[in-house]
Amino acid sequence: MKLPKFKSFLLLFLSLCSPLLLQGCNNGQQDKSQEELNRLSEAEPATETAAPTAARSARQLAESYLSKTPASPAGANLTLEQGKQIQKQFVRELSKTLGPRVGYKAGLTNAAARERFQVAEPLRGVLLEKMLLPNGANGAVVPANFGIRAIAEGDLIVRVGRDAINQAETPQEVLASLDAAIPFIELADLVYSEKVKLDASAIAAINVGARSGILGNPIPLAATEEWEKRLANLQLELLDESGTVLAAGKGSDLLGHPLNVVLWLKDSLAAEGKQLKKGDLLSLGTIAKPIPVRANTKKIRARYIGLDPAGSVEIEVNFE
């Protein structure tokens, strides 16, 4: 074969095959990219751009959180679903430092808070092992600058006692699968710079503000009508070091009844193919309005009235 004809043949061959070869290379790259996207989003479907963006935003938020440096917005015009995707990877980053998951928290369980942030239902976050601190004989001692935008909330935790809670359909059935109620002062952190206007997606992205909290002693629960009423009617007061009441609320402020929050948490997890398990701690949301923690804040005390049949219960946090 003469060289000119061979070159013509070679050019024709390449012109016909190159698109096929290029398509094959692109397919290989797409397969690898999709595998990475699925890994980042815990094998959940994700768009080609959403997962890398979520991973990047999550790392930036985690760096701000751990260094206590005000975070910039996690992203512009986020949907609530995108905020939740960032949260998953944000929690994954934090767990490297703060340990494994020990439970969940519900946020925006108060009707006024949901109206403010224009959401129809609460938000769910994750509690990690090292976030939770014991009350101690004289309360807990925490730096006043424990967070970037630090707030204290009068909260309530319940503990899952039976895996059967995942089949519960009514508050009574939920109560039968809980073994304790635990007084809880949540020390939350809004993480972002004060210049950032918060919305539901931004709050979801930062794990619903979970930073730390003070645990009281567990109070055994029983599946009785008395306990159902007790949980709804309990009163909580947040007081400062002088005994002045800073905020107050009652159990029914939590979705109408604290047990309704547990039902919601159970159902929201089930919608993602997940389940509660024995030992999980469930933070049900702030009963009284959140209190900003400033540099001059010395102490916040939470008093629970009507929760423990033995009498009122108090836990406190001292700031230094």
Image (spheres, rainbow, N blue to C red):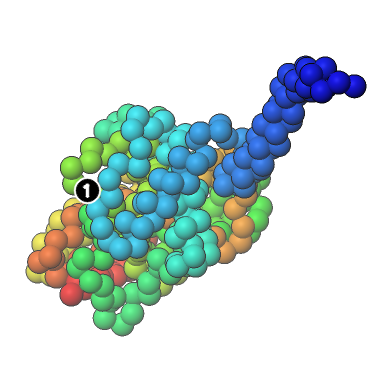
As shown in the figure, which amino acid type bears the numbered disc 1? Ser
The mark tally for this picture is 1
Q: Is residue 309 left or right of residue 139?
A: right
The picture places residue 265, in percent across and down from the top left corner, at 51, 45
Q: Is residue 245 left or right of residue 146?
A: left
Q: Is residue 183 visible?
A: yes
- The residue sitting at 61% across, 61% down in the picture is 278
- The residue sitting at 26% across, 66% down in the picture is 146
User: Element at badge 1?
Assistant: loop
Residue situated in front as seen by the camera: 49 or 236: 49
Query: Which residue bears the numbered disc 1?
Result: 193
The picture places residue 198, in percent across and down from the top left corner, at 27, 39
Residue situated in front as seen by the camera: 88 or 252: 88
Residue situated in front as seen by the camera: 169 or 297: 297
Which quarter of the image is occupied by the N terminus? top right
Which quarter of the image is occupied by the C terminus? bottom left
The picture places residue 262, in percent across and down from the top left corner, at 50, 48
Q: Is residue 125 visible?
A: no
274 over 222 or under it: above or below: above
Which residue is most to the bottom? 137
- The residue sitting at 21% across, 65% down in the picture is 145
- The residue sitting at 45% across, 36% down in the picture is 82
